[in-house]
């Protein structure tokens, strides 16, 4: 049975970065949907990833109504992983037939979240995960660290972890 595959990009990726994988899956006869959530906006808004995935879920529901196929999600990095989780929650709440068609997920290059998210972990790694996307959004060359922005972001994420501990445990 031909598959329906949603490729979910990493923070700062563009559709052109995912084109080779799209071509590969299309060559296998899959119906491919490519989506990259705005991870910065998603992290800053209540239920941000769920809001970000509305258009993706709408597209998948329409496609499933006209041509039912098993659904596979291919998620890149943390941004793709959080997008996949939010999309699955939204699909489950909106369309049980599409949720029943969900067949699997490929988690590609996602470092994840430790079992116990400590303040030290958050201040060290969250800025590094977000810095390439932030720098790209500012029109700068993406990299893991920036001499001014990395310490600022580490302080802000540390403060957010202390101020909103339940939100960071839930992540």
Image (cartoon, grey):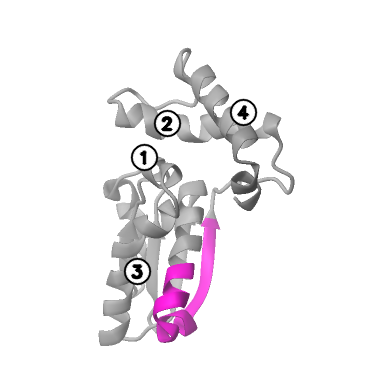
Q: Which residues are magenta?
A: 89-107
Density class for disc 3 (Cα within 10 Å; few <14, some 14-19, many ≥20) is many
> Residue 129: image x %, image y %?
51, 35
Q: CA distance from mark 1 to mark 3?
A: 21 Å
The question of residue 131 being in magenta is answered with no
C-beta proximity under 8 Å, tags 2 and 1: yes
Q: Which residue is mark 3?
A: 57
C-beta proximity under 8 Å, tags 2 and 4: no
User: To which quarter of the image does residue 72 belong?
Assistant: bottom left
Instruction: Label 2: state its secondary structure.
Output: helix
Density class for disc 2 (Cα within 10 Å; few <14, some 14-19, many ≥20) is many
Frontmost residue, 25 versus 40: 40
Q: Which residue is mark 1?
A: 12
Query: Which quadrant would the N terminus be assigned to in this image?
Result: bottom left
Task: Identify the residue shown where x is 36% and y is 66%.
Answer: 25
Frontmost residue, 68 versus 26: 68
> Residue 40: image x %, image y %?
40, 40
The question of residue 105 being in magenta is answered with yes
Query: Would you place residue 132 above or below residue 113 in this image?
Result: above
> Residue 171: image x %, image y %?
59, 50
Q: Nearer the viewer, mark 4 or mark 1?
A: 4
Q: CA distance from mark 3 to mark 4?
A: 33 Å
Q: Nearer the viewer, mark 1 or mark 3?
A: 3
**Residue 142 vs residue 163: left or right?**
left
Query: Would you place residue 160 above or below residue 62 in this image?
Result: above
Q: Residue 132, labelled with which disc?
A: 2
Query: Would you place residue 21 above or below residue 41 in this image?
Result: below
Q: Which residue is mark 4?
A: 123
């Amino acid at each position: 049975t031909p598959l329906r595959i949603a490729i979910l990009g990493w923070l700062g990726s563009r559709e052109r970065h995912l084109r080779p994988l799209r071509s590969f899956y299309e060559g296998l006869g899959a119906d491919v949907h490519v989506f990259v959530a705005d991870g910065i906006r998603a992290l800053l808004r209540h239920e941000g990833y769920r809001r970000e995935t509305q258009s993706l879920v709408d597209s998948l529901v329409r496609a499933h109504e006209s041509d039912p196929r098993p659904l596979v999600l291919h998620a890149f990095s943390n941004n793709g992983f959080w997008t996949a989780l939010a999309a699955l929650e939204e699909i489950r709440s909106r369309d049980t037939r599409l949720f029943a068609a969900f067949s699997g997920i490929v988690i590609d290059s996602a470092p994840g979240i430790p079992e116990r998210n400590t303040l030290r972990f958050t201040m060290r790694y969250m800025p590094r995960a977000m810095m390439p996307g932030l720098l790209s959004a500012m029109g700068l060359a993406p990299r893991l660290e920036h001499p001014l922005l990395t310490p600022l972001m580490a302080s802000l994420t540390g403060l957010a972890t202390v101020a909103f501990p339940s939100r960071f445990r839930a992540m």
